[in-house]
Amino acid sequence: MTLSAQSILDFPVPQATHVVTARDAILYALSVGYGSNALDEKALSYVYERDLVTAPTLANIIAHPGPWMQQTGVDWARLVHSEHRLTIHRPVPLDVRLISRSRVLSVVDRGVEKGMFVSFERLITTADGGEPIATIVQTNACRGDGGCGSAGSAPEPLPKVPDGEPDIEFNVDIPANAALIYRLNGDLNPLHVDPQAASRSGFDRPILHGLCSFGHAGYAIVAAIDPGMATNLSAIAARFSAPIFPGERITLQIWHNGAEIRFRGLVASRGAIILDNGLARLS
């Protein structure tokens, strides 16, 4: 199809349904850091079917419409996830049919050979009754496109983190096999596991799924602020500012002001900021 801002804005993103099982919830939690210490009883409720609690960022993988942007004509090999915003209306329920409805919000064109940003919204509700579960706004950077014009209304920029020293620094070690496990949640993009696919996308090796690092950040924020894991998140958002590779350590810098959290993620060994303009709210 002819690539234009309006054709992307009007694209009918498919609906998707999902029934989340206990196994789904446990696999996701294990893939983003919960249970990394098998003797930590405080995190056990996220990875043990007895009195199971679903991780707040689990909603990111629920009723996903799949790689629909492949059908719009964009250069799929050079597309990366650039920003993500999750608002949690209630914990993801188990064994309940859920449905997602998505719409494209905006196309922001940076010019020929400079790429463009496409933002879309996904609302997840119960299929029967329409009870809201989560609202997600995702922005993709189409690095191989551009020059097709802009359309729609882009989300307001995420605020920058404070200039001062963070209140907390919390280290997260990403396992070397993190991408191999995380892909079992449904994102089978070979960019994250296949060196040849990564090379075609402009990377010298496979990169970690952005939403895997995002999920680790969600876990780390709660673990850093409330070691008892009794607190949870009602919202979390961040910009993916640089790739992270499996096996690296993320240092999460956290500014804590009551229920509002600001954060960013660093890989000190490379001097890279991999998550920036992070914003979260405690429930």
Image (cartoon, rainbow, N blue to C red):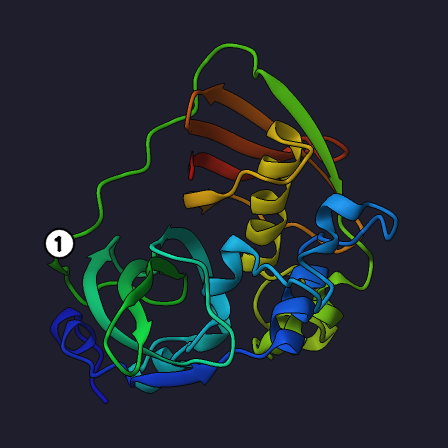
Residue 198 in view here? no
Left or right of 207 on screen, residue 14: left
| Residue 145 placement: quadrant | bottom left
Looking at the picture, which amino acid does disc 1 mark?
Answer: Ser
Q: Residue at x 75, y 62 (%)?
A: 178
Q: Residues within 10 Å of mark 1 (few under 14, many from 20)?
A: few
Q: Residue at x 20, y 80 (%)?
A: 11
Q: Position of residue 96 (x, y in %)?
A: 43, 80
| Residue 131 placement: quadrant | bottom left
Q: Disc 1 designates what residue?
A: 153
Residue 15 in view here? yes
**Above or below 13: residue 160:** above
Q: Position of residue 226 (x, y in %)?
A: 62, 31
**Above or below 149: residue 20:** below
Q: Quadrant of the C terminus?
A: top left
| Residue 261 placement: quadrant | top left
Residue furthest to the top: 164
**Above or below 42: residue 165:** above
Total number of numbered labels? 1
Left or right of 243 on screen, residue 91: left
The residue tagged with tag 1: helix, strand or loop?
Answer: loop
**Above or below 137: residue 2:** below
